Image (cartoon, rainbow, N blue to C red):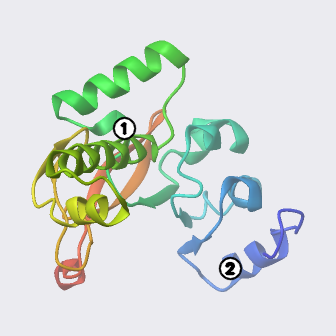
Amino acid sequence: METADADPRSALTAALRDGADLIYGGFVLDSGGPRVIQAMYDEGLFDAGIKFMGPDGVLSPALIEQVGGAEILAGNTYFTFGGLLPSLLSDEAGMRFYTEYVEQFDEEPDPYSVYSYAAMQVVLSALETAAESGTVDRASVLGAVRNTATFEGIIGTFGFDENGDNTAGVYYGYDFEGEAFANPTAITPTMHESCE
């Protein structure tokens, strides 16, 4: 589908006819993801055992309302996200962030909120490190970030490798259970080896 205005029913009917067992949609909420999921429900694809899988662009509490309710998602959908959802963080700082966010805003935080917060924690720490060295400029702050081998932040302990990639970088797959995204499973480069 090229736009959110496209009608997905003909493509979904063909997938049902051709024996598909999964529809992958690389959507975001505003580009047709909820519409495809709703059409899969309306056209009987979920009843036929065909699942939907989508990326972080649809992994949002707003999806539940946009598709017409949690019962449409439960048991029918899979999602991927580059980390743990805020509600599933198990360390003290992560749980405190989640609890205080929900109390203050009366809604679930966006999945990326804790990672944005963690990024700012690293930047503030790098600014402090640069200030301690006597020079606060772009090069000294970037150097401090690059030299962060172990950082204790809101998402737990992580650092950066020689390529600048964070060491907490685990990708997760989720399903939907009851009223929530659930059952995070780490996606690893070798996980296919355990598949039959």
Q: Quadrant of residue 24?
A: bottom right
User: Which image quadrant: the N terminus?
Assistant: bottom right
For the point 18% across and 85% down, the residue is 193
- Disc 2 marks a residue whose amino acid type is Ala
Which residue is tagged 2? 15
Task: Return the residue nearer the eye: 78 or 87.
Answer: 87
Q: How far apart are marks 2 and 1 (CA)?
A: 34 Å
User: Which image quadrant: the C terminus?
Assistant: bottom left
Q: Which mark is residue 86?
A: 1
Task: Return the residue nearer the eye: 196 or 118.
Answer: 118
Single out the mark in the foreground, 2 or 1: 1
Q: Is 120 situated left or right of 189 in this image?
A: right
Query: Disc 2 vs disc 1: Cβ atoms closer than 8 Å?
Result: no
Q: Position of residue 127 (x, y in %)?
A: 28, 47
Q: Is 14 situated left or right of 51 in this image?
A: right
Mark 2, other Cα within 10 Å: few <14 / some 14–19 / many ≥20 = some
Q: In this view, does 109 lie above or below 134?
A: above
Q: Where is residue 84 in the image (x, y as percent from the top left)?
A: 32, 48
Question: Nearer the N terminus, badge 2 or badge 1?
Answer: 2
Q: Is 42 situated left or right of 145 in this image?
A: right
Residue 41 seen anywhere in this rendered image of the structure: no
Q: Position of residue 139 (x, y in %)?
A: 31, 67
Mark 1, other Cα within 10 Å: few <14 / some 14–19 / many ≥20 = many
- Disc 1 marks a residue whose amino acid type is Pro
Q: In this view, does 36 lie above or below 162?
A: above
For the point 19% across and 35% down, the residue is 90
Task: Return the residue nearer the eye: 109 or 32.
Answer: 109
Q: Position of residue 157 (x, y in %)?
A: 13, 48
